[in-house]
Image (cartoon, rainbow, N blue to C red):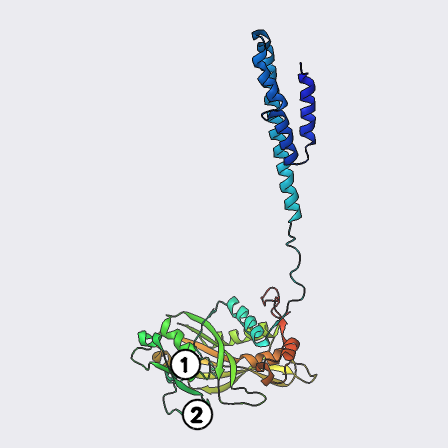
Amino acid sequence: MTDIAELERQLTAAIAQAGDEAQLEQVRVAALGKKGSISELLKSLGTLSPEERKTRGPQFNGLRDRITTAIAGRKQALGDAALNARLAAERVDITLPVRPEPRGSIHPVSQVLDEITAIFADLGFAIAEGPDVEFDDYNFTRLNMPPGHPAREMHDTFYVAAQDDSAAANGEAAGQQKTRNVLRTHTSPVQVRTMLKEKPPIRIIAPGRTYRVDSDATHTPMFHQIEGLVIDRETHLGHLKWTMEEFAKAFFEVEKVEMRARPSFFPFTEPSVEWDIRCDRSGGQIKFGTGDDWLEFAGSGMVHPRVLELCGLDPTEYQGYAFGAGLDRLAMLKYGIPDLRPMFESDLRWLSHYGFAALDIPTLDGGISR
Ligand code: PHE
């Protein structure tokens, strides 16, 4: 007669020693399979006398149940161990820095645009956009430069073959012209687009490409501007001044700037003001807050009542200010870039010299230029 206690010891030891699920399965088959040791015992019950069956039956069944439970327990443990081993092997260290040397770099104009966007987003401005190919009506007429107005001549406009504009045909410029035929000479037509579309309070900046027939060391036929527009019931020149100062301080990353307001003229603002910043350029590098030099920063003014009217706003109810600055010029000033033209020549040597790390995104708290 098989010694049940001895068999149980052996099986229990084999279960404990099974190193993986395959070995454990072998132990299971050897004990509980068709010809397994426990199965044979259970089969032998039929050959026993009724008395013996009464005592042996519960013993055999008890053994089978304990071994079955032990195998299940071991199986679970092996499964957990296998999973843990896999998790450890496939572990990804998410604290590792990404590729240490990212290729490519951010163009200074894009960098400056991101910086200015961060500054004005913090002041609660939204971003507005308009197309490069613009209606004569939006680029000039509704900005108080009707056909024949002498200020149009100052813009050296590129005219292009008329572009059909389905948005206009759908009523955006209903009753007005339906084709766009100038390359916008400034970002100011985005003022028009915004006022035609939105009710005040309006607080937007509009960065983008602009075009003029002009080319020398400080002019390229394509350049970039940033426009600002704020319209509300009581917006006044003081708000404009504060905005210009905050913009200048945040952009040039200085505690204090001294600004000078110069009377100027734009057909679409009245009064018109140009802003200069006191600076010192004697050391080859620009310093702000000291010196006897003045740096032209931005053109601006209170939106002309006629423009409000032409854009569907009641000038007795609303007023506001607008400003515009050259993005490329600001980039050159801030980052000491002497010549404008190579900015748009796609020379990789230039870009790797003046470009910015692709992963440094300007934020006000992280430092806008680093
Ligand atoms: N659009 C003007 C320019 O291109 C700049 C400007 C914008 C002036 C808004 C006043 C207000 O010179």
Q: Check disc 1 and report its element: helix, strand or loop.
A: strand
Amino acid at pointer 2 = Glu
> Viewer-proximal residue, 61 or 207?
61
Q: Is residue 149 above or below residue 138?
A: below
Horizontal and vertical percent for residue 98?
A: 64, 61
| Label number found at residue 134 | 1
At x 37% / y 83%, what residue is drawn?
137
Picture quadrant of residue 131: bottom left
Query: Hey, what amino acid is under mark 1?
Result: Glu
Q: Quadrant of the N terminus?
A: top right
Return the mark for residue 153: 2
What x and y, as percent, mark residue 335? 63, 78
* Horizontal side of residue 340 vs 101, given as left or right: left
- Count numbered badges in the picture: 2
Assign a secondary structure to mark 2.
helix
In depth, the one of 345 and 248 nearer the eye is: 345
**Residue 62 occupies which quadrant of the picture?**
top right
Residue drawn at x 66%, y 17% is 4
Who is closer to the viewer here, 364 or 214? 214
